[in-house]
Image: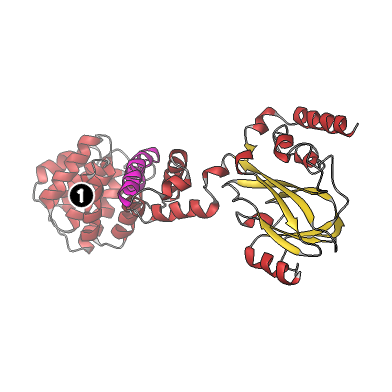
Amino acid sequence: MVYKYFSFLILFFIASVPLSAQQDGYWDKDRATSKQIIVGAGDRIIVSTEDLPVGTTEVVYRITLLDENQQLASSLVSVLKSIPDPTGISQGSAGAILLMSKISGEDKCKYAIFSNQSSALEYENDGKTSNSCFMQNNPVNKDAKRLSVNSSSCLKSNVLWFGFESKNWIMNQRIVLEVVPWVDVKLSRGWSLENRKLIIGQCKATDLAKKLPNSDDYCVCLLDKIQKEYKFQEYQKLMAMEISKTFRDFGKSCWNEIDGRNAVDNSIRNQITALLKAKKYRETIEKSLQIINNGKATALDYNTIGICYIFTKQYDKAIKFLKEGEHLDDSELLVKLNLAHAYLLNDNYSSSKSIYKKYQTQNVTDSLSWTQKTKLDFEAFQNAGLQSDDFDKIIKLLDNN
């Protein structure tokens, strides 16, 4: 009758667990613990489990005390292989903690569980249980429970230590200990929070990451690719040159995915805006050349360097770069206006006059007219010590329109 009840219970658990959940993990029967322990009369003894595999999030254990002539009806592994997933407290492994041996002896014992050997040894020597992560003070002849990383501190290490205290003061006790880990497939790859932080830290120290104003997206992209390619244990075994190559190859891919070049250029442009506002023309030129030499410059980038060359009285260079900007965008009137200024200050009144006259009825921005901007620029030039006898002629030309 009991056997039929457990068989029905197992079938109920199988039907209750969604198929998608079964794919999240597995009962690792290959690294389960199954030990028979002899405890002397009235003695205490400690027993360690096998190393729990990386990614263990739960364990189910069963303790059974047997008389000398008794055997277990079936192993815990054979029972659990029919229960695919422990995630549902009222469905999956909740049933596992009810599954025990059909046969147990008359003897009873107390037991405690420890997450480290030193605490377990204290228990063996003096019965101290204050450092245990679980304690069963009421003597039992069989017991089964589930331990989870979410509800127990026992799983903070990769080995559990069981301590048993015999309550038979005359005869030895034979105890069967079975422990089966549930392994989360994703976590089994070894990419814990600390290990992921390690890769992010290594990424932040790379040259490409240092170029970015914010390297978070880049480093997360690189981390994702490494996690997909390697288990953490595999990554640790790579040689230094292999790790460098991995970072280079994945780094190039991530750089393109996040449009790293544009992010860097936009950061440089923000620096350029601040430098130009502070009238640091030499530094502005150097920063502008970085963008231009990268081949990603816009007409306004050329306009900025043209302005700086004008204020530093390098008129030929100003004309050269402003013409390149004009070639990129023939509709950008700020470029055309500064080109006219460069011609005028370079004693080429004829070329400047034709440009001033051609666009004098238009606006250079949505709220600033060509004439207003010209007057503001002439004032700025004079304040900077840039003079031309033709400033007044151009103003009269524009005012007489």
Q: From this viewpoint, which residue is outermost toward the bottom?
A: 126
Residue drawn 82% across and 42% down? 98
Residue 397 image point, x, y percent: 20, 44
Number of numbered markers = 1
Horizontal side of residue 229 vs 315, given as left or right: right
Residue 27 image point, x, y percent: 65, 38
Give the residue type at disc 1.
Answer: Gly
* Quadrant position of the C terminus in the picture: top left
* Quadrant position of the N terminus in the picture: top right
Question: Of 155 and 216, which appears nearest the observer?
Answer: 155
- Residue 276 higher or lower than 52, as above or below: below
- Residue 118 higher or lower than 203, as above or below: below
Task: Residue under label 1, please give it.
Answer: 306
> For the residue labelled by badge 1, is the local secondary structure a helix, a strand or a loop?
helix
Residue drawn 79% across and 44% down? 97
Question: Of 215 and 102, which appears nearest the observer?
Answer: 102
- Looking at the rendering, the stretch of residues picked out in magenta corresponds to 240-264
Residue 343 image point, x, y percent: 13, 47
Quadrant housing residue 221: top left
